[in-house]
Image (spheres, rainbow, N blue to C red):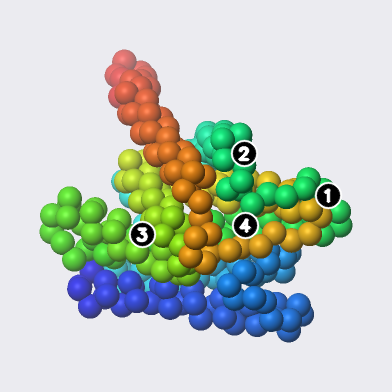
Amino acid sequence: MAPWKSLVVLIAIPVILLVVQVIVFQVVVLIEGPADPNKPALTPLTIAASGVSTAITAVLSTVLVAGMAKVPWRAVFRHRRAFDPRRLGVYLLGAAGLVGLALLVTALIAPESTGWGVFEIGAPTIAILVATLLATPLQSAGEEIAFRGGVVPAAGSFFQSARLAVVFGIVVSGALFALVHVSLDPWFVSYVFVISACTAFMGLISGGLEAAMAFHVSNNVLAGIVNALFAGGGSSVVDRGAGSGPGASVIILMVMNVLVVVLVWRVERAKRSRPARTVRTGTSAV
């Protein structure tokens, strides 16, 4: 893309997300009343609003990038090959296993850092679980489409060098991704940046967004389920103020992110090392 087009994309995507969220969350405010901006509660409506607003942003971002770059909209989701649902399934299973292991290790090593309370299942818990299962995948996949499918290549297009393009794309995507998560805690900001960098690497290694989307969905859905089950029958609260992210749990989650990247690298390496299937037609083989 021309530099001005890349700049438009980099500015527009976080602005679109902000504007859409403000509009969608006004409906939540009308129903539930205003929330504490420093410690918002994760209610079924706020979870649903987050999923819907991010999904809308992903659609608008895809249209914007495809129009600016003059490429098919599918190019936002993959390069060098077609989008592969089987890859998505494999990475969902693998990422879910590693995320579950990380949550277990965190609970055993640093339980005080989890913020989990008493295990209880009530009507609010069931409603939150349903909202998490339905809306959180939209939110997680939508962020990958917008920030890894849109921001990374737009930022990288400023450079002719592939290495500079990759580095700059990852840095800009991570910075914007951390910015839209609105936190003053350095641990949380670092964690969000690591997630962004790792999912960008997953896309580069695999040639598409399947692995990044699968990991992000597994991470957010499993964390949301556990948080709901240990919220004492009510809603859990998101605290992103300074000092809200204890280092021990964040480091464990960062390590898990890197392990998912290693998983993707090994799976893709195994795919490339398989011999091509021979198809015989008459006396010739192709």
Q: What residue type is labelled 3?
A: Gly
Q: Residue 107 carries which label?
A: 2
Q: What residue would you read off at disc 1?
A: 121
Q: How crowded is mark 4: few (under 14 residues within 10 Å), some or many (20 or more)?
A: many
Residue at screen point 41% across, 72% down? 13
Residue 266 locus on image (x, y percent) = 38, 29
Query: Which of these two is toward me, 286 or 29?
Result: 29
Q: Quadrant of residue 14?
A: bottom left
Is residue 220 left or right of 152 when viewed as pictured? right
State the SS at label 3. Answer: helix
Residue 232 locus on image (x, y percent) = 79, 53
Q: What residue type is labelled 4?
A: Thr
Query: Which of these two is toward me, 173 or 86?
Result: 173
Residue at screen point 61% across, 63% down? 238
Q: In which quarter of the image is residue 207?
A: top left
Q: What residue would you read off at disc 3?
A: 174
Q: What residue would you read off at disc 4?
A: 136
Q: Which amino acid does label 1 sit on?
A: Ile
Going from N to C along the chain, the mark reached first, 2 or 4, is 2
Is residue 211 left or right of 121 when viewed as pictured? left
Can residue 70 be seen by looking at this rendering? yes
